[in-house]
Image: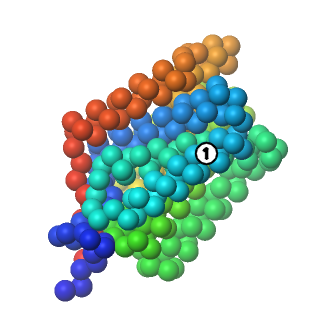
Amino acid sequence: MNEIRAVGSTDGLNKVPEVTFVFWLIKIAATTLGETGGDAVSMSMNLGYLVGTAIFAVVFAVAVTAQIRARRFHPLLYWTTIVATTTVGTTLADFADRSLGIGYAGGSALLLLLLLGSLGVWYRTLGSVAVSSVATPRAEAYYWLTIMFSQTLGTALGDWTADSMGLGYVGAAFVFGGLLALVGAAYFRSRVSHTLLFWAAFVLTRPLGAVVGDFLDKPLAAGGLALSRYTASAALLAFMLGAIMLLGQRAARAAH
């Protein structure tokens, strides 16, 4: 049988979740948590973007290593790794955009090239970038590298749209929410590659989460609600945990 299996997997299942409405609901919450959590460390704790990036990079490395070594799909481990990519993406994008002085446009362009490069190398090496192909440690490594670039790009895009383009957090949220709705419509009503649409949606959920997170914790004068970053992060984390435990998720089936 020509069945692709992950090391230690059973019945052709891989270690990432099936892509359903619940997946996207938790993903948006995770990206919003990444924004408030990343800002809490770099800004509220006054550690700065570079130190914050170093801290979250270590968390990301540990989480990804555990995820790749796991023998089957564990929802809490998977979403912990996703949150790690969003927090490191937040501080890394802020460091590139602000501390390095390349601006939102420069940072977004650089990160887009890195994302496309990661997808390109992954495709040329393994022949597919579909979720159903993430069934080996090598494929998982490409999957998580691509996700980290997509999360970092999404942060830069969110900040660029809300700040530099003058749309504000609410306006930017409508823009990215509308783009996600278009991707969803294309999924159900067009023949556009579902793999392409998945990665488009994956990227777009990050800036949506970024601007929603900023809306929650930025000062009133800046167009936010001025909520505590710690309180917002705790509430988002509680929502995620509740969704993971109550709504349930299944492992995606590996390609045959």
Q: Looking at the figure, which quarter contains the N terminus?
A: bottom left
Whole-percent x and y of residue 83?
A: 46, 44
Residue identifier under label 1: 55
Secondary structure of the residue carrying tag 1 is helix
Query: What colour-coding does the image apply?
Result: rainbow
Q: Classify residue 67 by image quadrant.
A: bottom left
Q: Classify residue 251 by image quadrant.
A: bottom left
Is 233 placed above or below 138 here?
above
Residue 223 shown left or right of residue 198 in the figure: right
Whole-percent x and y of residue 128?
A: 42, 74
Residue at the image point whose x is 52% and y is 52% from the top:
60
Residue at the image point whose x is 32% and y is 67% from the top:
132
How many badges with numbers are in the image?
1
Q: Is there any visible trace of residue 26 in the rendered image?
A: yes
Is 231 placed above or below 58 here?
above
Q: Classify residue 117 by image quadrant.
A: bottom right
Residue at the image point whose x is 58% and y is 36% from the top:
38
Q: Amino acid at mark 1?
A: Ile
Is 203 placed above or below 128 here?
above
Residue at the image point whose x is 65% and y is 28% from the top:
45
Q: Is there any visible trace of residue 184 in the rendered image?
A: no
Q: Residue furthest right?
A: 101
Q: Residue furthest bottom?
A: 1
Q: Looking at the figure, which quarter contains the C terminus?
A: bottom left
